[in-house]
Structures are given as C-alpha cells and as structure tokens.
Image: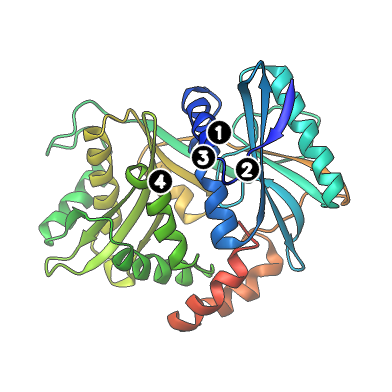
Amino acid sequence: MIVRQLQQDDAAKAQIWDSFVESCPDATFFHLSGWQRLISGVFRHRCYFLYAETESQIVGVLPLAHVNSRLFGNALVALPFAVYGGVAATSPEASQALEQAAIDLGNQLGVEHIEFRNIQPKHPDWPTQDLYVTFVRTIPSVLDEKMLCIPQKRRNMVRKAIKLGLYATQDDSVDEFFPVYAENVRDHGTPALPKRYFSELKRVFQDKCEILTIRSKDGAPVSAILSFYFRDRVMAYYAGEKASARNLAANDLKYWELMKRAATRGCRIFDLGRSKKGTGSFEFKRLWEFEAEQLNYEYVLLNRDGIPQNNPMNPKYRLFIALWQRLPIPIANAIGPYLVRNLG
C-alpha cells in the first residue's frame, strides 16, 4: 500500500478520486476533490489531499488543509469549512496508512495538532470533542399541502408564511443570497465568509450546490439557504434570514420548500447540518423532529496539551461576539474574511 498526494492540476486523478468518494460508504460531500481548489484558492491554505493506493486502485482518501494562525493555532484539519471529514477508506489498513501519513506530515510541518472531523468514533483512546451534533431525517414519501409529515406547530408556521404572501424561488443568485447570509451571521456575532467563496462553491460543484430563496410578497429576498447534494442526501448548509423576516415564519417555509425540492431530485435523506448543543439552532432542529447524531471530532496532539476550543461557546470570545454584533454590515463584511479564514 502506498500513500500519495493528489496534485491540484491532475484532473485525471481527481476524477478517479471523486469516483472513489461517490462509491465509498464512509465518504461525504466534503471528501470530494473540489475542496482542494476552494480552500487553497479562496483561503490560501496549503492543502494535502492524501490517498492510499494498492495495485493502482484508490482504497482510501484523507483531505487535509494546513491552517496556521497566531490567534487560533497551527493545525492540520480534515477538513476546514466542513462539518464532516477524516479518513474515508475501504479497509482498516488503508485508514491506518492515511492516519500515519497525516501524523508524519504534521510532524514535518510542526503543527500543534491534527483534527479529524469524524462522524463515527474511530479511536476511543484519542482526545475527542463532543460539542457538535448533526441532525438528519428521512424525507417523507408524501409531501402534499396537508403537511401531515411535519409537526403540527411547524405546519402552522408554514401556513402562516404562505398566508403572508411568502414564496420560494430556486434561482441560485449569490448576489441575492450573500446579503441575507451576511446580515444573519453578523447578528449572531460571527464573521461572514467572503462572497467570493459562495461564487466558487457554485462554480466548482455546479448542480451539486443550489440556493433556495424565500421572498416576501413584493419579491424581496428575506431568507435563503445554500444546500449541497451528495448521493441520496441533501445538506442544508449555509443559511440566513433578514431580521425583518423573523416574525413571518420564513425559516419554517424555507425548510419545507427545501424538503420538497430535495424530493424532486430523488433525495432520501435530509441533513440539517451540525449545531452546538444548547443553542437556538439546536432547539429549532429538534422542533422539526430531526434526530440528533453525535459528531466525534478526534485529535492527535503533537505540540499541545489539550483540545483547542476555537468556538463561540468559549467564554473568552463573549466580548468579541458582543462587539461584532454592533458592527455596521459593510465593516463586518470587510473585516470578516480575514478572521474567518483561520477558523474553518
């Protein structure tokens, strides 16, 4: 078994890599080779997309990026800007070879730690972060105007939005999506990702990436969501809504319309993405009767004593969050990309 690195300009090998990802049960949307171009091109992080090969056949992949920041530490991450990651392989031997290659690379680069964003636990003896859960449910076979497949309170909220004249469009406009997203994350005290990133997501992943917009009765965007499609799964990933829409039930209408859209594309699983325990997002997803599944982020600590806590739940960031929420949107959008590139 040999571990090699995928070169960014090797289109033929990237195609083979993606074919493996599409067929490997452990792989996710975030194992696709396109993330190498995105992360290196938009955020300027050096990527190391490793693959294990036997008899000229790929048997495992591990996408890594080197994130080195004075504020947030020096790490190899599998994979920044992804909720899922780590090794995707067809055998324990391939997994072990890729993990050892990552550790060797981490020592070579002098990183403090390596982060594997696993869904399932793989190494009970490794330090593990259990802050996040992901929410999934099976998409019902019947999605009609009665909406009997969703909880009654959510049905009432969707009907409220429709009565107020809100409606959904599938238009993939980054220009309309970004202001809605950026206002929402600012209000939550989080720096926005750059607008260019969303344009590149659309360019790299094409029909695997869609934007759904909820509009007021006069056509103005009030809520929007960018989703990923992978195999039989839709992932509701980047979302936002205007403050003016919070009493219009736009959020509920958005997820109902996305569920219907995913069904038309043949999806079977609705993935609402990760949330931190104890947050408003966590509670909202529970009210939709999505099942919480623990994420098991595992770490190899090379030059540090404990797991990094670079998340908004860390008390040391409370003052920063409060100040960020007061920033004018143009200033937040100008400064945000320089900070968020190192958070991932």
Q: Neighbour class for label 1 at 10 Å: few (<14), some, many (≥20)?
A: some
Q: Which of 250 and 83 is in front in this view?
A: 83
On the image, numbered disc 1 is attached to which residue?
A: 13
Q: Residue 235 at what x, y percent from top left?
A: 40, 41
Q: Do the residues labelled 1 and 2 touch (CB within 8 Å)?
A: yes
Q: Residue 102 at what x, y percent from top left?
A: 76, 38
Q: Residue 277 at what x, y percent from top left?
A: 56, 48
Going by the numbered disc 4, the residue's amino acid type is Phe
Residue 156 is left or right of residue 110, and the answer is: left
Label number found at residue 205:
4
- Number of numbered discs visible in the structure rendering: 4
Going by the numbered disc 3, the residue's amino acid type is Ala
For the rendered model, the colour scheme is rainbow
On screen, 58 above or below 279?
A: above
Q: Can residue 123 be seen in this view?
A: no
Disc 2, SS: loop
Going by the numbered disc 2, the residue's amino acid type is Gln
**Residue 146 occupies quadrant:** top left
Q: Which of marks 4 and 1 is nearer the N terminus?
A: 1
Q: Earlier in the sequence, mark 2 or mark 4?
A: 2
Q: Neighbour class for label 3 at 10 Å: few (<14), some, many (≥20)?
A: few
Residue 13 is left or right of residue 220, and the answer is: right
Q: Distance between the residues labelled 4 and 3?
A: 15 Å
From the viewer's perspective, is the residue at label 4 or at label 3 nearer?
3
Residue drawn at (71%, 18%) of the image: 92
Disc 3, SS: helix
Q: Which of 102 and 279 is in front in this view?
A: 102
Which quadrant does the N terminus fall into? top right
Label number found at residue 7:
2
Disc 4, SS: helix
Residue 19 is left or right of residue 146, and the answer is: right
Q: How far apart are marks 2 and 4 (CA)?
A: 19 Å
